[in-house]
Image (cartoon, helix red, strand yellow):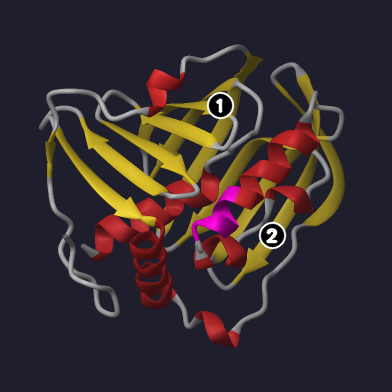
Amino acid sequence: MKTYLRALGALLCTTTIACADWVLVQKTNTDGQEKEMTTKIKGDLARVDIGSEMSAILSAEGMTVLMHAQKMLMRMDAGTLKTAMEMAAKASVPLEKHAPAKPVTTGQKEKVGEWEAEIFTWDGPLGKGRFWVVKDFPKFAEINAVSDKLGKAMGNPMAKMAPQATDFGGMVVKSEMTTMGKNISTSLVSAKEQELDVKEFTTPEGYNEMKMPALPGAAPPN
């Protein structure tokens, strides 16, 4: 369970959420395992597809995790999700002893795909990282603001200890992080604004629900 929660926290810390309808495709590498991650956004709703194995549907009310091979799903309301994130965070570092760390620009620039990016570094209680930031990325402020808003609505303490999207003043198109014992790199392949059907953010038919076991400090699941 702890391993799952840490992976879940890492996912939430590196996921980008926007408020218009967007489709963002990223290449990710976690400890040598490469995946393609597609984030679909409609308002404050988001669906993150990690390869073909797993999806997460997120909103201010909570999260539904879909495990496609097993045709299983697991639901977490906002309160349960907050408790899960706190458990995972405290397993890695005592958060109450640390203040959030801010990313710092190196003044260096580097070409990442089609974008000219400025390099930032970050060193905090959950790890360290380098970020390639595009200052003139279209609508980056909209994307970043809602990304941070959703993280706060979910009560994710790990997000508070990692860089916030609005800390950069641009769009992160590449990142390399070491956090919670994992080496995670991401690169943005594409970002397209397009209309999405709200049905993509609902639970599909034919999936059996797996009840999440009660967490310490949380009420037993219904």
The quarter of the displayed image where residue 51 is located = top left
The answer to whether residue 70 is left or right of residue 20 is left
Tell me if residue 22 is in the magenta stretch: no
- Tell me the quadrant of the picture where the N terminus can be found: bottom left
Q: Which residues are magenta?
A: 150-154
Task: Check disc 2 and report its element: helix, strand or loop.
Answer: strand
Residue 158 on image: x %, y %: 51, 64
Task: Tell which of 185 and 51 is nearer to you.
Answer: 51
The residue tagged 1 is 42
Q: Residue at x 37, y 68 (%)?
A: 88
The residue tagged 2 is 122
Q: Is residue 29 above or below residue 38?
A: below
The three-letter code of the residue at mark 1 reads Lys
**Sequence-wise, which precedes: disc 2 or disc 1?**
1
Residue 189 on image: x %, y %: 58, 20
Q: Residue at x 75, y 58 (%)?
A: 103
